[in-house]
Image (cartoon, rainbow, N blue to C red):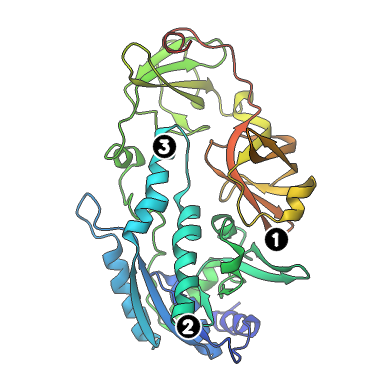
Amino acid sequence: MSAKKAFEGVLKLLPEPSSGRSNVLLGLSGGVDSAVAGKLLVEKGYQVNAAFLKVWNEDKDGAPCDEEEERRARQVAIELKLHDFSVYNRVTEYWNSVFTPFLDDYRTGKTPNADLACNRDIKFTLLSDESVKKKNDLFATGHYARILTRRDGIHLARGSDPVKDQSYFLSSVRKSALEKVLFPLGTLHKEQTRKISKWLGLPNWKSSRGMCFVGKRPMLSFLSQYLVPAPGSVLYYDDGRVLSTHQGEFHFHTVGQRIGLAGPGVNERTFIVEKRLYVEPGTKQTVCDVVVCQGGNHPALFCKQMVCDRIFESTPQSLLESSMTLTVQTGHGAEPQTARVELFHEDGEARLKLRFQKPIRRSAPGQAIVLYGADLCVGGGYLLSDDYERKTESVGLLQQGES
């Protein structure tokens, strides 16, 4: 399909501007996606105002993070002849609501996803609130997702592009925000967006970065600026042997991640099965023992059950009242899996138990587990634990630190 036909096809699908629904506040990032989204809205007849969100100051390497994207966003706003361009500084809010919990999770051995928290607590909260303050009826972003209306209200749905679909990252956004959002790119594929941008003569920059604060640095290098990585032993899952020690380089690695390990008894590729953090009684030093297995298809890398806590507010009450079979996404781009999902309570907290039809590859504690009914996103939570079989406590350093 030509860029022109794709563009015209999306225009037909966008809702018509109407009284009380004609002014749109567009989240403009400086990337190709929000630029094309803006052009679609303008051509449809909406009055579009732009909002650029600043969440991070210069990175520690002195390279501008938001600065270049702001310049690009301004240029796009001028080319599209948008009515207004506003910059919103949310550096403090981002630090408190997104970045500090992100560090806390890594400190305690989890693997967080900052994008979900940023979308929920910063981006969509800002756009929703500011659209009201500035008398905009709606707001829009360049995400690849859709909003579908059913008898029980509106629902977040997968984007038409199965590779680029971003509903996973939007799954915890509050329903009140979704009621006012437009996703102009929801029915497009990423390649179509790039072709449309080129056809329109818009700047064809790369998409804006997700975790801008990391930049081009390795995650370990970045995290080490804020956290003290804990050293420990590397333990063999099958028999508890101590294969080696590490000086903290594996503290920030994640379950299922391949690590470079060589030495006696290491004959295959090595993967992390579990991280065990504890405080050594004598020295009061935090220790991070890493349990590993050999071979990417080792049974310890799979599970059949998961437990999630911190259930998303977007999870409907009907799901919490009875168990049901749903499709589960354990990560962005992960293969969808089928599971029976039910609510239970433990230690006074609501949790979700997921029972999969077949063993699936494990995820890391702290990762978002997102639930779908067909293409509709119906909430989720964060992985607390799974039914991975933990072996008898291993020999060596671990036993010294546990009572």
**In this view, the mark in front (3 or 2):** 3
For the residues labelled 2 and 1, the Cα–Cα distance comes to 27 Å
Image point (41%, 52%), residue name:
97
Residue contact at pointers 2 and 1, CB within 8 angstroms: no
Residue on which disc 2 sits? 39
Residue 141 in view in this figure? no
Mark nearest the camera among 1 and 3 is: 3
One can see residue 213 in this view? yes
Q: Tag on residue 68?
A: none
Report the residue that reaches farthest toward the left: 62
Q: Secondary structure at mark 3?
A: helix
Count neighbours of disc 2 (C-alpha within 10 A) and say few if under 14, some if 14 to 19, many if 20 or more: many
Q: CA distance from mark 1 to mark 3?
A: 31 Å
Q: Quadrant of the N terminus?
A: bottom right
Judging by the rendered image, the residue that carries numbered circle 3 is: 106
- Amino acid type for the residue under numbered disc 2: Lys
Left or right: where does residue 313 sit relative to residue 139? right
Residue at horizontal 47%, vertical 72%?
A: 129
Dot 3 or dot 2: first in sequence order is 2
Query: What is the quadrant of residue 21 in the picture?
Result: bottom right
**Which residue occupies 35% across, 55% down?**
212
Q: What count of labels does the image hold?
A: 3
Q: Amino acid at mark 1?
A: Leu
Q: Is residue 109 left or right of residue 358?
A: left
Q: Nearer the viewer, mark 2 or mark 1?
A: 1
Measuring from the top left, give residue 110's x and y in whole percent. 47, 36
The secondary structure type at the circle numbered 1 is strand
Front residue of this view, candidates 261 and 244:
244
Numbered badge on residue 376? 1
Disc 1 crowd rating (10 Å Cα; few below 14, some 14-19, many 20+) is: some
Instruction: Say which residue appears at 36% left-offset and 16% top-offset.
Output: 245
- The reply, left or right, for residue 249 in relation to residue 273 is left
